[in-house]
Image: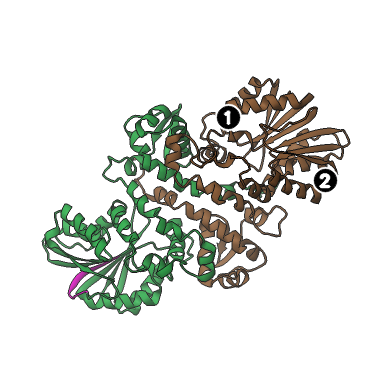
Chain colours: A green, B brown
Amino acid sequence: MSAQQQPSPEHFFDTANAYQRSAALKAAVELDIFTAVAEGNTDAPSIAAACGASERGARILCDYLVVIGFLTKEGGRYGLTQDSAFFLDRRSPAYMGSALDFLLSPTLMAGFEDLATAVRKGGSQSPGGGTVAPENPVWVKFARAMAPMMMPAAQEIARLVGGDAGRKLKVLDIAAGHGVFGITLAQQNPAAEVVALDWPAVLEVARENAERAGVAGRYSVIEGSAFEAEFGTDYDVVLLTNFLHHFDPPTCEQLLRKVRAALADGGVAVTLEFVPDEDRVTPPIPAAFSLVMLAGTPGGDAYTYPELERVFTNAGFSGNERHPLTGAPQTIIVSHR
Amino acid sequence: MSAQQQPSPEHFFDTANAYQRSAALKAAVELDIFTAVAEGNTDAPSIAAACGASERGARILCDYLVVIGFLTKEGGRYGLTQDSAFFLDRRSPAYMGSALDFLLSPTLMAGFEDLATAVRKGGSQSPGGGTVAPENPVWVKFARAMAPMMMPAAQEIARLVGGDAGRKLKVLDIAAGHGVFGITLAQQNPAAEVVALDWPAVLEVARENAERAGVAGRYSVIEGSAFEAEFGTDYDVVLLTNFLHHFDPPTCEQLLRKVRAALADGGVAVTLEFVPDEDRVTPPIPAAFSLVMLAGTPGGDAYTYPELERVFTNAGFSGNERHPLTGAPQTIIVSHR
């Protein structure tokens, strides 16, 4: 008896068709299937009626959502998984269906249309530097779409470096996007003042969010590129969330020198990143993220922790601590001036 | 202690990005990464050199292929999985990388670009009936690309209904495509005569394959649509491989009446299909196939075995037997006149 299994083309076939999973999830969110099921529509005819869909379409899509783990099916009735109820019912405070507007935006997907060419060249084929091109409008989409997905990380960052409520805290939020990292800090510490830096069109979104969160009075902005704008000085905290992965190590180092110069004594830089293990193939989500950077940027990457330590050390920082998130595939790194 | 896990956005994020798996597999096949590894190139620099790729691109793509289960990585060296060695090394007789030319063809992928609309309407949005439009050139791609993936099924069909070598056998291969089902029968039984039916451009591929297999002398063709062409009579075997799923049950029934009329006494129709269980959500590959039919056809589906029995019975067939394949996610159904 051999321990070898018979070769099977199933994984090849399943992976070739994997793009259909993205499309099915997108269709389900567009049609609001998960909210319909949450509201008690549990068979194809009633889901179809609630979502303005055909019965055949609702039945086939819902069965597919069971196959890929977003719905359950028992005795012919569909139900939500725990995660779908939490993240995909539009009435849930943690709803993150909107994240697909960014994750499946034509800009991001374009990088994968001819991935072989990106592999040949070693970086994005998109004109002007891919997603890191100046004022790329995809970052407005990012700002509008990705806030819910970032809440667990924002809360953990506020807990780690938000300081005691009432203690003055000067915060610079680089590439602020939706702004939730700085805004969450400002909500937790009523003495915190936040300066958000990003492209002007993106800052409109951050400003709206600051207004809605009631912290607009302690929220100001710097328009422009993190590499060119004047940061100011004496910051207690500089936030670098989902940013360093877009650039090669020398570019990161150059930016980090500038960040360090803007920090007050005792100040910290807070980095949020996908950090794969040193084997670069685990855990799956951080390790897989490297391909997004190959497809979308000229020189970005998902850096291991030793690689991140190196760029911070080279830029003059005195030490780093890492804090892996629970419930999200990212890691927070706190780096001391 | 609760048995509930903390909600995690990981499955949502991973599924949103699933299209990247298809793109990575396509790039790897285009660059012939698997053959390069099989030939002894096991680190990023040597794979890059062998494939005409950048080192950064090769490293990131290969790491991603480890994450999604197509390569192994031990001590920084890449290796092939058992399935990759069997199916994706270009020198393997079972090489099926070419299947991506069909599976990831713009025609098939177009059906998933606006899947929500297909769910609303209940069928393909493509003009003229999607993949079942007359003479759709995607079937030439299918014929050129999919033969290797069909070999296990072709061999099993030949074993089941090929008859004793030397016993005369008249075979009609409907929607023959690459022709391998009929050709494999003809190779096994030197007294078998095969008539292949398909669009003219597709039959050129089948004829080439028959020539190469040395059975061209017993291979003739009928050009046109299975619904309109004259089949002739007295067939011992009519092959219906990967065909019925494109149509709704009344259309299948109408075709099967015509098939039955073309069979000799004691003749059989042989169907190859993705057959999900009656719950329609298992096994994953046959169950998921239903969505491909929603996206690509006006009324097709992946039918359960009772549904297939019903259309055959309604068309006058006297009985059916099913033979699930091992090593492929499809089922063979033999239906007696």
Task: Return the x and y of residue A212 as percentages of the image width and height.
Answer: 17, 52
Foreground of the two, A116 or B207: B207
Using the image, name the chain to which the residue with label 2 belongs.
B
Please count the marks in the image.
2
The image's mark for residue B304 is 1
Of helix, strand and loop, which one carries label 1? loop
Foreground of the two, A166 or B153: B153
* Mark 1 vs 2: CB contact within 8 A: no
Task: Return the x and y of residue A41 as percentages of the image width and height.
Answer: 36, 29
Q: Residue at x 67, y 38 (%)?
A: B325
Direction from residue B316 to residue B298 in the image, left or right? left
Reading the image, the residue beneath label 2 is B216
Marks 1 and 2 on same chain: yes
Of helix, strand and loop, which one carries label 2? helix
Q: Residue at x 24, y 78 (%)?
A: A261
Foreground of the two, A159 or A50: A50
Foreground of the two, A158 or A105: A105
Q: What kind of secondary structure does the magenta stretch mostly adopt?
A: strand
Q: Estimate the spatial distance between the alpha carbons at disc 1 and disc 2, rounded to whole Å.
A: 36 Å
Task: Return the x and y of residue A263 as percentages of the image width and height.
Answer: 21, 74
The image's mark for residue A140 is none
Q: Residue at x 33, y 66 (%)?
A: A243
Q: Quadrant of residue B302?
A: top right
